[in-house]
Image (tube, rainbow, N blue to C red):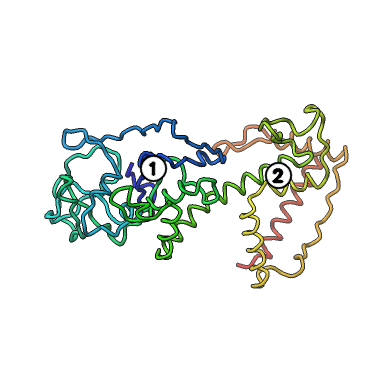
Amino acid sequence: MNWGDRYISHQFVKIYWDEVTWAIRTAYPGIAMARMTAEDVHHEMTEGDEITEPPARVRYVDGKLEIKDQMKEYADRGTELDEMNLYDYFTLTYHTKDGIDNEEDDAPDDGDEDVHPQPKRRGRRRNRRVAYLERSERKGCRVFRGNNMETVLHFIGKWFPSRKDGNSAYYAAQVLALLKPWRTLRDLQSIWPTMEAALQSFLIGACDETHRIIENIEYFHQCSDSARARRDQESTQPGSGGYYRAEGDGSEGMSGANPEEEIAFTEEDVERARAARYAAREVVYGQRALLIARERGIFRELPTDTGERMGVAQATRRETEMFEQWGREVAAMTRQNRGQVERPLELNPDIGDFLERRCQLRKRWRRSCPH
């Protein structure tokens, strides 16, 4: 909303990866699609399966509707960007509707919103610009992002498959489409007999950044597999009250024979539940803070001694009655109203002695106070 009530450290650029996978399956009909979801559901496409094209994305530019095709936009990049892969193309550059002769930099046009004419304004020196291929007849150009523009790609669609999946060819094709420069999808396999061989040849000369991206893709599956294994382990533990997955047909059932049977909790379970109320990170933070405080001498080694509190005896029945009587007599005392006393009051001897002692203590305290 641009209200200024939050700080965004990075700019996110959406990459619609389903369009890429659809194009790969169209260019290589023999490639099967693996790991459809994060739950490790596999589906092998056969020659007779119909390849469904993802819905087209359109935008409104200068009064006209245009189809936004990121793959076609990448393939039409200028010759100066021949060695730039798809990942770097959208991370390091952005599209602008103005040509390379424009003296100012417009805002990045990486979103799906409609593009409207922007007012001309003076600003910093423009960044490097690269025109699209002339034969593409594409308007605008690519502008290199500034050094202070932190950009992160946001992939929309199914996540990349794992290298451990059964279909290594489909995995290799997606990695090559993301990290290997290409003009057409036929350049992915190139002269190599298989997609796996093409990937191995590409990784031999790849930089460290490319290998890091591949490991980050695999890290998603490692986290997903670890979380799934942990859930399965917790669900099969006795007394967990969870569910287990039956062997064979994949159905789920209760972990106990009688779901209404009462679960017996132990003292260890209670202590574990109490400890789980607080986040482990907060507990470790507090323990570390106390340790530093003790090392710096902020806290004493032994507990601080406190003075002995004088015991207070409970009032007797006679004292309670006397206190109530004093309260009634004090409430009935005549108060001064504009310097006149409306009704005199004879004090009870007991309360009179109490007030006299109070006056004497006040005078003694005043004499002892320094002036």
**Kind of residue at badge 1:** Tyr
Could you say whether the residue bearing mark 2 is in a helix, strand or loop? helix
Q: Can residue 243 be seen at all in this image of the molecule?
A: no
Q: Earlier in the sequence, mark 1 or mark 2?
A: 1
**Tally of numbered tags:** 2
Circle 2 is placed at which residue position? 233
State the residue at coordinates (23%, 49%).
76
Question: 17 or 230: nearer the eye?
Answer: 17
Residue 100 x %, y %? 14, 54
State the residue at coordinates (78%, 45%).
269
Asked whether disc 1 touches disc 2, contact meaning CB atoms under 8 Å apart, the reply is no
State the residue at coordinates (39%, 53%).
176
Dot 1, how many residues are within 10 Å of its Cα: few (below 14), some (14-19), or many (20+)? some
- Label 1, label 2: how many angstroms apart (C-alpha)? 40 Å
Question: The C terminus appears in which quarter of the rendering?
Answer: bottom right
| Residue at the limit of the structure toward the bottom, as seen here | 296
Question: The N terminus appears in which quarter of the rendering?
Answer: top left
Circle 1 is placed at which residue position? 28
Q: Which mark is residue 338?
A: none
**Kind of residue at badge 2:** Gln
Residue 192 x %, y %? 39, 55
Residue 186 x %, y %? 33, 48
